[in-house]
Amino acid sequence: MSPNKACPVILSSFPGTHILLFRHPTAGVQLVKGTIESGETPAQTALRELSEESGIGTASLVSDMGCWDAEHLDQIWSFQLCFTQENLPQQWNHLTLDDHGHSFSFFWAPFDNLPYADCHPVFRRALRFLTAKLTAKGYVLAHDQSRNT
């Protein structure tokens, strides 16, 4: 499976494990994601997209979390677990230069209360896939998901 999209995943704890999501002004809650350009690796794309869509400019790769078939528009997503030492607030807005200059509203979502109802079905499935992957690798503990079972 060869990916054509890359998705950086950033985790934090406030306590409990949280994942970085954003609210698109017209398309609901999403993960950062973008097209892998010619000559880029999925990791390079993930870091570029993270900077472009969120303003987080100093992140590094922790782990390749594998690929996932989105079963939507022939998209194969590569999930890249990333880390930043930036002191990120609990919420912020970032004006993108791409995507027609939208303002994206970023927030940390706890794994025990992910906003599935506010997500497009593709992002719901992506979050379920990620939750399983992150749990299997020990990044998310079972008690972090207690309300989502």
Image (tube, rainbow, N blue to C red):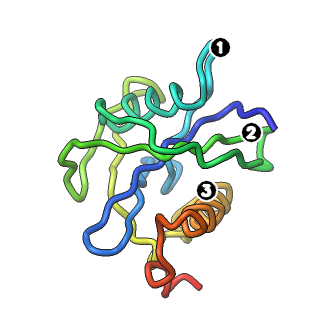
- Image location of residue 1, percent across then percent down: 81, 38
Looking at the picture, does residue 20 appear above or below residue 36? below
Side of 13 relative to 109 (left or right): left
- Residue underneath mark 1: 38
Residue 133, picture quadrant: bottom right
Callout 2 touching callout 3 (CB < 8 Å): no
- Residue underneath mark 3: 123
Residue under the point 29% across and 38% down: 94
User: Along the polypeptide, which appears first: circle 2 or circle 3?
Assistant: 2
User: Along the polypeptide, which appears first: circle 1 or circle 3?
Assistant: 1
Residue under the point 60% across and 24% down: 41
Residue 102, picture quadrant: top left
Amino acid beneath label 2: Gln
Q: Determine the CA span between mark 1 and mark 3.
A: 25 Å
Find numbered disc 2 in the image and state the secondary structure of the residue it sits on: loop
Between 93 and 58, which is closer to the camera in this rendering? 58
Dot 3: within a 10 Å radius of its alpha carbon, few (fewer than 14), some, or many (20 or more) residues?
some
